[in-house]
Amino acid sequence: MSEHNQLLADLGLDVQLHDKLLASQAKSYRDIILSQPDRPGAMAYFDRAAHGAHGGRVREIVDAREQGAKMIGTFCVYVPEEIILAAGAIPVALCGGTTFSVPYAEKAFPRDICPLVKSTLGLALADICPYGPIKDMAVGETTCDAKKKVWDVISQSVNFHVLELPQKKTERGGDLWLHEVHEFKERVEELTGARIEPGVLAQKVRLMNRKRRLLRDLNELRMAPRPPISGKDALLVMQLALIDEPERFCNELEALVAELRQRVEDGVSPFAPGTRRVLVAGCPSVLGNWKIHHIIETSGAAVVCDESCTGTRYFENLVDEGAQAVDEQLEAIAERYLRIDCSCFTPNTERIEHVVELAGECRADAVVQYILQYCHTYNIEAIRIARALRSAGIPSLEIETDYSEEDAGQLRTRVEALLESLQGVSP
């Protein structure tokens, strides 16, 4: 048994099943990511990081925990990472993006729930997620009914904290959210035994803002007339932003951004001139899931922006760095995170307007609304977004799907039909 498999066995994982998962993902990665032409050289680091998501990164966290650090698993971009980092803990997204683990979740949970939730649960229930045994606390949030009820079940056996997100962005909702952020800070301090000091919190705010600025730079470069990077590679970078060590990630992303700027100047792109531009809006695509982007880009278009939690919702808006006292810093953090325009809010006019605005900024020829099955908030909100896009003269397509490949042919036909409808329209 290899040293790494011995580590996984020591953590209580089903090593044989885990090897099957990695083999499945490795093939998908080769076929979808590594097969792309004209990839930036700096993507080599992100390829290694993706390969090490169940390898080197796990060992890194295990070693840190042996030195006294705590790992906190997250499921949503509403969890304030600055607070976790300021307490010396390690935030890692626990969401699953593979259909491999779904059958294991369906043995215990209803089939008619979100694929992301089922994939995540299946990884845990089948003992194939290496982060499960090394997390010291998991943090959920109230963004959807499926998650809320799942938290009730798994919190019986796991150290768990739930952040209550208000359903309205009113003054009262803001007060509730600020209270939740304060309570979360106290819970993290209790877990780690570390008091969060204003100087350290300010440092972590700056670190996270640096990450957001760099991801924003990446996003803006994708909006070039000929994007210097594919939508699949840009998505991979975003997926790893939720897992990788943040300072190292920022350094590597800075190198990628510099290379992409040079590629724009030199006219280097994986796409031919005149390639149709697509904005993908809606549900997140977490690590292991490149399905929609792959279909779009192998149908002859370029994904030039992602309006999702693995896209603009993660990096838009900065935390005010001017606050000095901890209470003021927590208020600034709460204000920034509440500006995220998830579909869970009502009313949610700001997201409708934002999608249309983004489509204009990235000069999208069309918008594909990506909706995971049983995600009712995004599915229903798609109606209003489609109307708003029509009013703005922007064609759109709504896709409701899961992580399986069973509907890939049908979806490809629909995407190709959308792109064919753009013939004769100036790009």
Image (cartoon, rainbow, N blue to C red):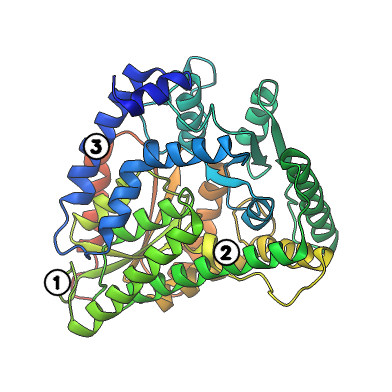
Q: Is residue 402 above or below residue 314?
A: above
Q: In front here: 54 or 60?
A: 60
Q: Position of residue 97 (x, y in %)?
A: 40, 39
Nearer to us of marks 3 and 2 is 2
Q: Which residue is mark 3?
A: 26
Q: Position of residue 141 (x, y in %)?
A: 67, 43
Q: Is residue 50 above or below residue 302?
A: above
**Looking at the picture, which amino acid does disc 3 mark?**
Ala
Q: Position of residue 379 (x, y in %)?
A: 51, 47
Give the secondary structure at mark 1: loop
Q: Earlier in the sequence, mark 3 or mark 2?
A: 3
Q: In front here: 405 or 84?
A: 84
Considering every residue shown, the one lying at the far top of the view is 107
Q: Quadrant of residue 21?
A: top left
Considering every residue shown, the one lying at the far front of the view is 67
Q: Which residue is mark 2?
A: 208
Q: Position of residue 129 (x, y in %)?
A: 45, 29
Q: In front here: 300 or 136?
A: 136
Q: Which residue is mark 1?
A: 272
